[in-house]
Amino acid sequence: MSPLKRLEELEAAYPRLRVCSGDILEAYEIIRRTYESGGKLILAGNGGSCADADHIVGELMKGFCLRRQLPDAFVEQMKAVDREAGEYLGERLQGALPALALYTQPALSTAWLNDVDGESMLAQALFGYGVEGDCFLAISTSGNSANICYAAVVAKAKGMKVIALTGRNGGRLKAIADISIVVPEDETFRIQECHLPVYHCLCLMLEEYFFGETDS
């Protein structure tokens, strides 16, 4: 299914998200170009948005709706290293789109909290992991979470693209990001309810582009 048809499907199921369609498509193009140039997607959020960041990683790093069969040449390379292991892994491994959620390193997080502060912790992790050509997906229901905004500033300074996934009026993130998907809700839990179909749509479009057949 083409990206435009995926958007039509999203709009049919969630009519209120129609206002976000153009921004969703632009975010898809940014992430697609990131992957095509060898970059990775780095994500961060707080609370439920942190869980959403992990959720997105799970959809990108393994098969979501497609099997993502490994190239035969790579399976043969694994067999050349160890035939039994290569056969086993060749039947199980799947194509991956590199994605990393911050806040998953407890030693780094607790050390930074103890030695420095909480608001700059994500910025430090982003500074260490991010490189020019990567993309940062910043998730904040208000768009004003200080730690997310600080990380976005670092990402832009490093030459990364920044996509904001927010609600309300987009907050401070909207002014920093290259593109902002601002869902039309004001209450935190309602914003999060809208975020899930948005990022599922993005993950489907990316998976189908890199691992499936697209139609016109």
Image (tube, grey):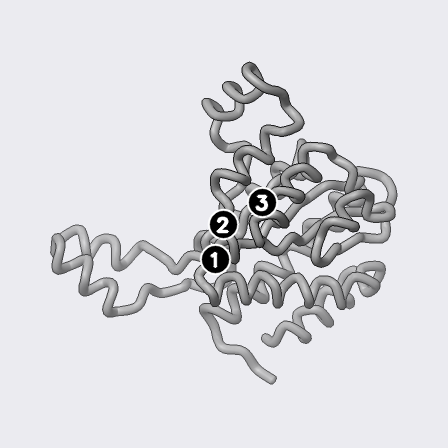
Front-most of residues 130 and 75: 130
Give the left or right position of residue 104, taking residue 45 as reference.
left
Residue 94 drawn at (x, y percent) = 37, 58
- For the question of whether residue 189 can be seen, the reply is no
- Residue beneath the point at 30% across and 68% down: 71
Q: Alpha-carbon distance for marks 3 and 1?
A: 13 Å
Q: Are the residues flagged by discs 3 and 1 in contact, CB closer than 8 Å?
A: no
Quadrant in which the N terminus appears? bottom right
Residue 174 drawn at (x, y percent) = 78, 50
Give the left or right position of residue 136, taking residue 211 as reference.
right
Q: Are the residues flagged by discs 2 and 1 in contact, CB closer than 8 Å?
A: yes
Residue 137 drawn at (x, y percent) = 62, 49
Q: Is residue 148 above or below residue 93?
A: above
- Residue beneath the point at 65% across and 54% down: 199
* Amino acid marked by disc 2: Val
- Residue beneath the point at 67% across and 39% down: 49
The label shown at residue 131 is: 2
* Amino acid marked by disc 3: Leu
- For the question of whether residue 159 can be seen, the reply is yes
Q: Nearer the viewer, mark 2 or mark 1?
A: 2
Q: How many marks?
A: 3
Q: Quadrant of residue 150?
A: top right
* Amino acid marked by disc 1: Gly
Q: Is residue 62 above or below residue 215?
A: above
